Amino acid sequence: MAPVSPKKPKGKKPAVPKQVRGWRRLLGGGGPSFFGNLITTVLIFLLLMSVYSLAASFMQPANDVPLSVVAADVAAGKIETITVNGDSLDLTYADKSVKTSRKDPSAGLPETLATYGVTPAELAKVSITIQGQSGFQFWFLTLAPIIIPILFFVFLFWFLSRQVKGAGMQAFTFGQSKARVIDPADISQRVTFKDVAGAREAKEELLEIVDFLKSPKKFLDIGARIPKGIILMGAPGTGKTLLARAVAGEASVPFFSISGSEFVEMFVGVGASRVRDLFQLAKKAAPAIIFVDEIDAVGRVRGTGVGGGNDEREQTLNQILVEMDGFEPTEKVVVMAATNRPDVLDPALLRPGRFDRRVTIDLPDRRDREEILKVHAVKKPLGPDVNLAVVAERTPGFSGAELNSLMNEGAILAARESRKEVTQYDLIRSIEKVMLGPERKSHLLSKKEKEVTSYHEAGHALVSSVLPNADPVHKISIISRGRAAGYTLKLPFEDRKMQSKKQFLDDIAATLGGYVAEEMLFDDVTTGPSNDLAVITAIAREMVTRYGMSEKLGPIAFGDRQLGNEPYSEEVASHIDAEVSRIIDEAKARAEKVIGEHRGALDAIAKELIEKETIERTEFEKILIANGITPKKRDEEGIDIIPSTPGGVA
């Protein structure tokens, strides 16, 4: 399954819903609170008043003189002119200096000076000019000290009341659905089956849904009832969401998309309210598609005792069940859901009448992988040496999302080296980068560690090449990638849907090859095989408990032993542990036999690794032939293939 060729809008960090932000602002959480805003505003007002008072004090002219001095200067004949502007006096002295003073606003200048002993004859020697203030200026200066504080507080209370009103209004939308809607008329977001590579069977199943949404009359006339719900099941990255969007795009109907986790809130009843609102919106827009991604977030089995009787998740699930079962045949609303955990869903959700059609989306096979790679290569300039069929051969087990990442990593590698085209070498390197991570060139091994790692990986490769049912080796490296100090890459010649008991046993022996090589060559073991041991223990236990591959216990499947769940007795558990140990011990003995018989090949492989650090398939096969081992070949002719899954990680 592949992602679409149109670019999806880049996902942003989920924003906090508006109503939640409103309540937080009102109550003081997640940002400035109501009371915090009030206190802050008052403090700012007081600060502004202080600054204004300070500025006003500095605005007093430095040459302002007292009125008594003015009267004495007038009597002495030192002042030539006086300009009266309200209660302000501008004084021009005989020496041309200019000073200012103020008089009593309630009395005229002659009366004011007369009180200081200035005679009319002395005042007559001074030129007095009176300048009147304009009406606006007079009233503004008079009323400003009163009006400005009033306006400030009016604005303050308006702002705070608007904030409280917004929070209160948002509280009424708290139970509304947060579904994202894709309009069928929006060409930029429209996806059709042409944009989906692979998943042929899944698309055939969904074509009936498209036909019903386009022309439901022919189904209703004959008495047919289209499935009300379709659940898409598959591994992560296989394109479940993409297929749902393609159905809406093919049918040209609105697409309501929401995640299962968006229904659940800390307040009981909110999830159920959002479910009701979502279905009401879809019914108004019918025909339409409702898509619930990761439905296992709310659709898990009920009655587990977690959360009590008022568990919000269970109430949300109950509302979904009611809404789906309440559809009328002519409602023309189809519910689609996606999950990679169908085993945990409630049986009532999967019964006929609700999700009555299950569509399984498998990992793409080789042909599908090639089609997916072509989809993602549309906007990438590829070099003449690029062969996507080879890349598809080398990527078994890759999902559509991983193939998308592979092509993107190839383009990044080319851009990093300032090239205009993506080459085959870029794509080959990006396969290992997607699987194991980038090379850790700074992680340098000491001489001893390099030797141990080389023999470890050589042990994996040698045992895998000798045992008949193990996958062939395509590359060995002691260059660190991700968490691995070294790796051996193996790949089957063709995609497999089933694994046999003999294949399991040979894989366990090959995985133990590194551990055995360390033990035999250095009479010691390191922490390198820790991942190998975890892998083979899990495989051996599944062989015994799930696949019935134990001769002693027979074809019986045993459940997992967990707290409160004891599907078998302690005696049976002891037998299971004994069988797991027996399988691993026998595999280890086989690995020891192979390495003992082909010690020369082991030394040759390790020596080559120490010198070159990486051995490709062609070079590896030459070493095998030189030591009398016949490399594994394909039955039919075809292109050489390289790995995809690590056979051993040191």
Image: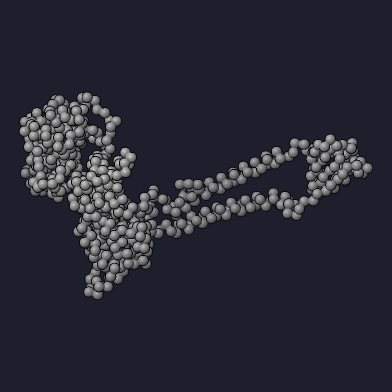
Residue at the bottom extreme of this rendering: 221
Residue 244, above or below 329: above
Residue 393, above or below 605: below
Name the spot of residue 332 as percent of width and height, x first: 30, 68
Q: Give the position of the C terminus as an image quadrant.
A: top left
Residue 613, above or below 400: above
Quick one: 78 or 501, which is closer to the camera?
A: 78
Q: Quick check: can you spot residue 276?
A: no
Q: Which residue is painted at 29% across and 52% down in the image?
A: 378
Name the spot of residue 552 as percent of width and height, x first: 6, 43
Residue at the front extreme of this rendering: 384
Side of 616 where 628 appears, left or right? left
Q: Which residue is painted at 13% across and 40% down in the image?
A: 472
Quick one: 83 or 103, which is closer to the camera?
A: 83
**Which color scheme is applied?**
one colour
Q: Which residue is painted at 37% across and 60% down in the image?
A: 186
Residue 606, above or below 337: above
Which corner quadrant of the image does residue 395 belong to? top left
Side of 495 where 49 appears, left or right? right
Q: Which residue is painted at 69% across and 50% down in the image?
A: 144
Quick one: 19 or 372, which is closer to the camera?
A: 372
Side of 474 where 12 appears, left or right? right
Q: Quick check: can you spot residue 605?
A: yes
Name the spot of residue 93 as percent of width and height, x first: 84, 38
Name the spot of residue 530 as percent of width and height, x first: 20, 34
